[in-house]
Image (spheres, rainbow, N blue to C red):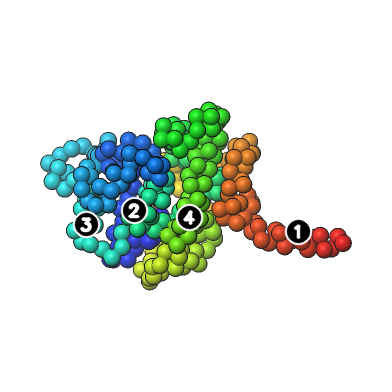
Amino acid sequence: MLGDLLSADPRTAQLFEPFSPLSGIACVDRWYASADRAGSRWRHVIDDYVAGRNTKWRTRRDETPNLSRWFKGTPMLREYVAARVRRPQRIVVKCPYLTLSAQYLIEQHDFRALFTVRHPGAFLASLRRVQWDAAVWLDDLVEQESCSREERAMATTEAAQAGLLWRIVNRHALETQRRFPNSAVLLSHEDFCADPHGEMDRVTRALGIAYSSKMREAVTHATGGDIVIPPEGKVEHLVRNASAMVGEWRHRVSARDEAELRQICEPLYRELVGTDWLGRRLVALDQECETSKATAR
């Protein structure tokens, strides 16, 4: 959703998930291309993509080849060509699968990165809703040495696999933000749902772009709907009731699954977003604790 919101201005173009092995660049055959690792084979793929050379696109399985598509290309190819021809003021590359390449993109190609951090419970609920298997992604991360074989072997349940994937990706996001504080921004999904305009204003200022009227309209439209639980199997559904979605995952994740997620993810989650597992601000909790101590004395 944030890719659409950040690209709401007329002079902005969005490139959607170019590094998805299902529908993106043809040679990308692994999830979460890890270009931040020294000697990664993905670096030259990124270089070519940014430079507009030697980049071929795969056709989706549900796209039957025909003469019209041969002339027009796939939707991703059309987006890519249009962005290079029209020369928009800003290009938004919406691609979570580039998270482990963010440092290379910042250092070598002057990108600015926005990382959206979802609650681990909400992440697991979303994976189940769209029937995605975290195990496939973890196996690709092991192959790229972004996950150890020992860690992968210990993640035997669906919740543990989702939790491990969440931890690997978000740990790298935090490391990137700390290394490049002027080029990388963290956004809590739950904070955005609770205060869409306030968080978008903060994010755009941190990214050095204007929170335009068009962007404000897009945020209002995208977060002011009636939907709290998007339909099963549907990956994208932009018009939703954002504030009502905060904590909704608790109705769809069992106590056992939540306990597994907490064990794997809670310390990092607290560090990333500044709240405890239940969404209470850590600063406020510390103040309560100090007040209790003073009262006890």
The residue at which mark 3 appears reads as 84
**Image point (64%, 59%), residue name:** 281
Figure quadrant of residue 219: bottom left
- Which one is earlier in the sequence, the residue at label 1 or at label 2? 2
The residue at which mark 1 appears reads as 289
Q: What's under tag 4, amino acid-wise?
A: Arg
Q: What's under tag 1, amino acid-wise?
A: Cys
Question: Which quarter of the rendering shows the C terminus?
Answer: bottom right
**Image point (50%, 59%), residue name:** 192
Q: What's under tag 3, amino acid-wise?
A: Arg
Q: Gap between marks 3 and 2, in whole Å?
A: 19 Å
**Image point (50%, 29%), residue name:** 149
Circles 4 and 3: CB distance less than 8 Å?
A: no
Q: Residues within 10 Å of mark 1 (few under 14, many from 20)?
A: few
Residue nearest the observer in this picture, 172 or 253 = 172
Q: Gap between marks 4 and 3, in whole Å?
A: 30 Å
Q: Gap between marks 4 and 1, in whole Å?
A: 32 Å
Q: Residues within 10 Å of mark 2 (few under 14, many from 20)?
A: few
Circle 4 SS class: helix
Q: Position of residue 140 (x, y in %)?
A: 41, 34
- Which one is earlier in the sequence, the residue at label 4 or at label 3? 3
The residue at which mark 2 appears reads as 108
Q: Is residue 26 left or right of residue 113?
A: left
Circle 3 SS class: helix
Circles 2 and 4: CB distance less than 8 Å?
A: no
Residue at the extreme right: 297
The residue at which mark 4 appears reads as 179
Q: Is residue 188 left or right of residue 58?
A: right
